[in-house]
Image (cartoon, coloured by chain):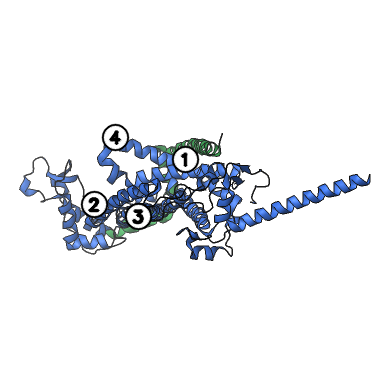
């Protein structure tokens, strides 16, 4: 979309130069950066301790006990439920033709099973499974349980799905802790950048002339997408981190309600987010195609590292904004596809496909949260006058000159051409008027 | 009204609309999962292939 500075006249406001800094003084932005950096470092330390302390073992909290049936002496019953379950597994393998010898009789008649309210040492139980050779082998083997079922759906006939352990390990380990590292790491990096670099200011101060950068449709669409994304990020994080981080604080009832609302809101907000991203593509894709300014801009990191001299030139969107744009478009598409696969379970994918979709959805969403944190930073506290570009649509002429010089030159050229045309028109009108 | 208010209101309105749509879809899923539907689908889904696999497994076990 072409800049709309021609359609909306530029505004003026009093010019303003920055007051000279007194030596040793620190801006409130830098102080804020230091405070946030300390908090983020503490959170990162907590994540580090949690990630290295946890080995990902999920222990059962309740158990099934085998009790002697009525009229049976305890000594006649099998020693525990595990023995019975092992016998049953053997029987199933024999029935499925995977073992030639029939197992010894299952001790079912002498036992009844009861759900134990509480398992004192679930971890020891899991470790005993791992240590016991036949069961450890069964845990490692894929496709161990096979048979036939007359249940109506194929998915209902899946009683045991060993890949679920891989999914749970990825979900509870790399994805959950990796997300913590990424989010708090990004917050720490941005806060340290703010503390050491300070806010990126206008080198020449405010000129007083305001030029339109985004029109009303672009801004409304941006805020629709942003509102949806932020709410989806919060509800998604509540779902991903609710059990380890929120459940101990708010209890089961509140967590249940929060989880149900989060799931509903998360799905419902997908519609405005997808529509917003589609409109962004229609509005901004041309401006976000690669151009000759991108590589020099990236090499100098946009000139953000210091206040010395002019920054590298950029057209309407610089290389950093293009990274955010394509990250949102491609990441949003991946989130939409994987999210739809989970919203309609077993419609397109089976268990393993949905596990992959869930893992990919969480990993891509966490990466997008980090990307958007950077976007929010540079569009608000990180850079002077950047927020007004998306709030009011107007930016100062010097802002445009310093951060999007190539685009500014285009606007200036168009204005000059328009002014020349109107002068020519006025002159020719005057000439023709003089003749008549 | 500024662009933020318009955008946020549009997001909420569209989310509410899609939630209503999901409600309607959820009814369909509930119907599909009802006992009657299970019986019907069980008959439809008991394909010859599956029945044959079951017969083979039983024959092996015997």
Residue bearing the label numbered 2: A58
Rendering coords of residue A399 (x, y %): 55, 51
Residue bearing the label numbered 3: A185
What chain letter is assigned to the residue under label 3? Answer: A
The relative height of residue A270 versus residue A286 in the rendered view (above or below) is above
State the SS at label 3. Answer: helix
Query: Marks 1 and 3, how far apart in space?
Result: 30 Å
Q: Nearer the viewer, residue B20 or A29?
A: A29
Residue bearing the label numbered 4: A253
Q: Nearer the viewer, residue A116 or A424?
A: A424
Q: Nearer the viewer, residue A414 or A112?
A: A414
Colour in which chain A is drawn: blue
Q: Earlier in the sequence, mark 3 or mark 4?
A: 3
Colour in which chain B is drawn: green
Of the two numbered discs 1 and 3 in the rendering, the one whose residue sits closer to the viewer: 3
State the SS at label 1. Answer: helix
Q: Is residue B40 visible?
A: no
Of the two numbered discs 3 and 4 in the rendering, the one whose residue sits closer to the viewer: 3
User: Within 10 angstroms of label 1, few (less than 14), some, or many (20 or more) residues?
Assistant: many
Q: Earlier in the sequence, mark 3 or mark 2?
A: 2
What chain letter is assigned to the residue under label 1? Answer: A
Task: Tell me where residue A61 sits by quadrant.
Answer: top left
């Amino acid at each position: 979309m072409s800049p709309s500075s021609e359609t909306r006249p530029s505004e003026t406001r009093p010019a303003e130069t920055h007051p000279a800094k007194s030596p040793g003084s620190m801006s409130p932005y830098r102080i804020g950066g230091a405070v946030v950096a300390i908090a983020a470092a503490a959170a990162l330390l907590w994540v580090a301790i949690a990630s290295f302390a946890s080995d990902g073992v999920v222990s059962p909290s309740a158990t099934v006990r085998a009790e002697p049936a009525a009229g049976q002496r305890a000594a006649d019953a099998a020693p525990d439920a595990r023995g019975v379950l092992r016998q049953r597994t053997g029987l199933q393998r024999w029935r499925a033709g995977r073992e030639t010898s029939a197992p010894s009789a299952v001790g079912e008649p002498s036992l009844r099973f009861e759900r134990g309210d509480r398992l004192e040492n679930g971890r020891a139980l899991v470790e005993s499974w791992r240590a016991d050779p036949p069961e450890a082998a069964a845990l490692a083997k894929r496709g161990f349980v096979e048979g036939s079922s007359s249940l109506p759906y194929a998915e209902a006939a899946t009683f045991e799905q060993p890949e679920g352990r891989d999914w749970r390990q990825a979900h509870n380990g790399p994805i959950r802790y990796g997300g913590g590292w990424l989010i708090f790491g990004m917050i720490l990096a941005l806060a340290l950048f703010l503390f050491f670099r300070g806010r990126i200011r206008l080198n020449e101060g405010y000129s007083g002339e305001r030029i339109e950068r985004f029109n009303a449709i672009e801004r409304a669409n941006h805020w629709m997408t942003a509102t949806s994304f932020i709410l989806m990020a919060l509800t998604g994080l509540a779902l991903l981190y609710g059990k380890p981080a929120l459940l101990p604080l708010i209890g089961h009832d509140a967590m249940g309600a929060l989880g149900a609302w989060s799931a509903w809101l998360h799905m419902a907000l997908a519609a405005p987010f997808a529509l917003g991203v589609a409109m962004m593509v229609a509005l901004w894709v041309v401006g976000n195609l690669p151009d000759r300014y991108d590589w020099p801009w990236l090499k100098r990191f946009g000139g953000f590292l210091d206040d010395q001299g002019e920054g590298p030139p950029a057209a309407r969107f610089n290389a950093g904004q293009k990274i955010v744009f394509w990250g949102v478009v491609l990441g949003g598409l991946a989130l939409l596809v994987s999210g739809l696969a989970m919203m309609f379970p077993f419609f397109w994918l089976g268990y393993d496909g949905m596990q992959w979709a869930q893992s990919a959805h969480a990993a891509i969403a966490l990466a997008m949260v980090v990307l958007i944190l950077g976007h929010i930073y540079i569009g608000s506290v990180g850079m002077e006058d950047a927020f007004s570009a998306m709030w009011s649509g107007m930016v100062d002429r010097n802002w445009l000159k310093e951060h999007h010089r190539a685009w500014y030159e285009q606007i200036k050229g168009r204005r000059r051409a328009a002014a020349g045309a109107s002068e020519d028109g006025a002159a020719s009108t005057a000439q023709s008027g003089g003749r008549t | 009204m500024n662009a933020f208010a318009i955008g946020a209101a549009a997001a909420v309105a569209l989310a509410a609309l899609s939630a209503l749509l999901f409600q309607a879809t959820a009814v369909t899923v509930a119907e599909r999962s009802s006992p009657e539907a299970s019986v019907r689908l069980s008959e439809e889904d008991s394909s010859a292939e599956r029945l044959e696999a079951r017969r083979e497994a039983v024959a092996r076990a015997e």
